[in-house]
Image: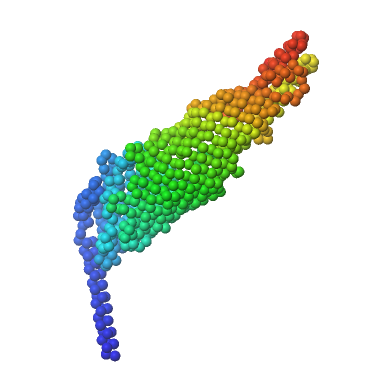
Amino acid sequence: MARIGILVDKMRKLLTFFLTTILALSLVCFLTFVGIYTLVDPNQLKSPLEKWASQKLERKVMIEGPLAWRLNPHLLIEANSLVVANPSPFMGEFLRVKKANVAVSLWSLVQFKLALDLKLEEVALNLEQTGNTHSNWKDLIPSFYPLPFDKNLRITLNSLKIENGCLRFEDMMNFQKFTLINFQFSADKLFQGALGKATPILLAFNLQDGKEKIMANVDLKADWRLNRNLRQVDIQNITLQATLRDHLPSLLRGEIAVYDFANTIAFNGKIDANQIDLSPYLSFFNQSSLAGLSKIKSLRTEFKYQDPWLDVASLNILFEDSGFLEGHFKIEPEKHINLVRMQGEITGKGLKINRSTTANLNTVVRMKEGILDFSPYEIYLNKGHHAGSFQIDMRDKTPKWSLTHQGYNFDIDDLTSLFGYSTLMTGQAKATLSLSSEGSDFKSIRNHLSGDITVQGVEGKVEGSDLVYLLEHTQATVKGLIDSITEKRPLNVVDTLTQELAEWGEQAKAGTNLLTPFEQLEAHLTFNKGIVSYSHINVVHPLYQLEGQGTLDFVNEVVDCVFKASLKDPSIEASTEMLTALNATPLTIQVKGPLDNPIVRPNLEIYAQTAFKAIQKNHSDKGIDKGLEKLFILP
């Protein structure tokens, strides 16, 4: 019992010692805080702080407002109107902070460390760039190296918060400008992250374009930790929610490792993304026919960055309704222009371009000296094979486009459906294209098209009209007029011809219930700055033949074409002279007017005149001659 009493007494003394020590330390800390708060004027620190920060950042730093102590509940120092100037030759301010609070954690002092909590309010950061290597921020990166990898970490940043920030970026060479507004950032327990324990960070902002329109809302959550053994920062459990303007939100997940701080930043990582809406970028095509490619179900990529290369080792894109894309590429900045060099390969399988057609593709991707080159590329559809090369020259403000393409045994509908004309023409075809243009949108590119297209088609049809019926109807009308005159029967020529023209007009509006089949089709089109010249169009069928030429003006959106059509086997009964004349003389058809509503008008005057001349030899009656002349007075 005596021994137990002695042991209890010693424990009581030891506990009293510890409690006394903790109380004394707390009292010392409290008296220290009270002494600092009441006796030390923080404005005495303004000049030394400005001098130290200016030397560290190598640019002028000013604290325009007063410094003050605050208890909330920790002791903190508050600075108002903190300004960092831009380096020469940039003008204005690089950074302005309306209010900055720096607090000291009491618990860190008990651990004989100094952990600071930094809070910045109404931050305005202006980033400017005038070239690939000339900017107002890149000289600051070495100021933050080396990071504190030592195990002691006696002084560290415990938390950082930014409220109501605004980050402006402007590329004065390429006339690009965007702004992050409502910028919020929060990172707590940085002390633990520096010791290798995962700690969260939060980031949110609205992306604004140069015209001050909101482009996207972004929210990011992640965990980070310092891996001192590998000398890298691990950013894990990344979750990014991005909502583009008027489109579905996109969800991104992944992880990144940042390393090699002593020289320059390098990192590698992998990212998964879901529900990405591509419809704003498919405006060149008919979006209903590309609906299967307009929404990405999932995107996965693995990448590595080591100055100056970004190596995307794998990229896999799975679309919601059809197929996938996969590829790999490397990107490096160009030395003399503000663009990048790139080289890689992209493969696609099962890509749906309309309800019944899928495509497989393979292409090599290169970019050098501002020219993006897809050469060679190959595309396999349900039917047919396409190959060629495609370049985009982005060295100037307005991009320039160039396409060399050959298609073999493909379905014409597969291509026309991309631009919303899925019922215009069907059939098998082969084509050769050599086109160039410039512009940033579909209309501008179309209006600057130059080059040539040659098309050969077989066993197809053109929907929207029945040419054979119209030719037969016109022959019957002309025959009826001439028979009425020669037999001296009463008739109204103007009404008859007006009705015939109305028949052509009604078919032009009838839609897809009518069709004209063909066995062979040949066409050569020449483009010159948005104006298409049809120098040769020839359509062959056992019942008819059609030839034509003309122009299609995309700039003024008008068409002016002339076709000549003739029946090979007329179904009407007529005299040998008239039938021979009608077969020998094609009906001239003019298509003229706005692209969206052209007027289709046959030239009945020449057609009727041909029949008149054929029978004029067998009739000498002047009354008949005057009657036939009425055929030339068209409505």
On screen, residue 434 versus residue 596, left or right, reads: left
Is 271 drawn above or below residue 286 in the view shown?
below
Image quarter of residue 619 = top right
Image quarter of residue 409 = top right
- Residue at x-position 74% and y-position 23%: 476
Residue 249 seen in this snapshot: no
Is 55 drawn above or below residue 234 in the view shown?
above
x and y percent of residue 491 in the render? 76, 18
Where's the C terminus, which quadrant? top right
Q: How is the image coloured?
A: rainbow
x and y percent of residue 33 in the render? 24, 64
On screen, residue 191 versus residue 346, left or right, reads: left
On screen, residue 26 versus residue 372, left or right, reads: left
Residue 349 seen in this snapshot: yes
- Residue at x-position 39% and y-position 35%: 395
Q: Nearer the viewer, residue 133 or 381?
A: 381
x and y percent of residue 141 in the render? 29, 49
x and y percent of residue 113 in the render? 26, 64
Where's the N terminus, which quadrant? bottom left
How many marks the image carries: the answer is: 0
Is 320 drawn above or below residue 412 in the view shown?
below
- Residue at x-position 45% and y-position 49%: 315
- Residue at x-position 27% and y-position 54%: 146
Q: Nearer the viewer, residue 222 or 96?
A: 222
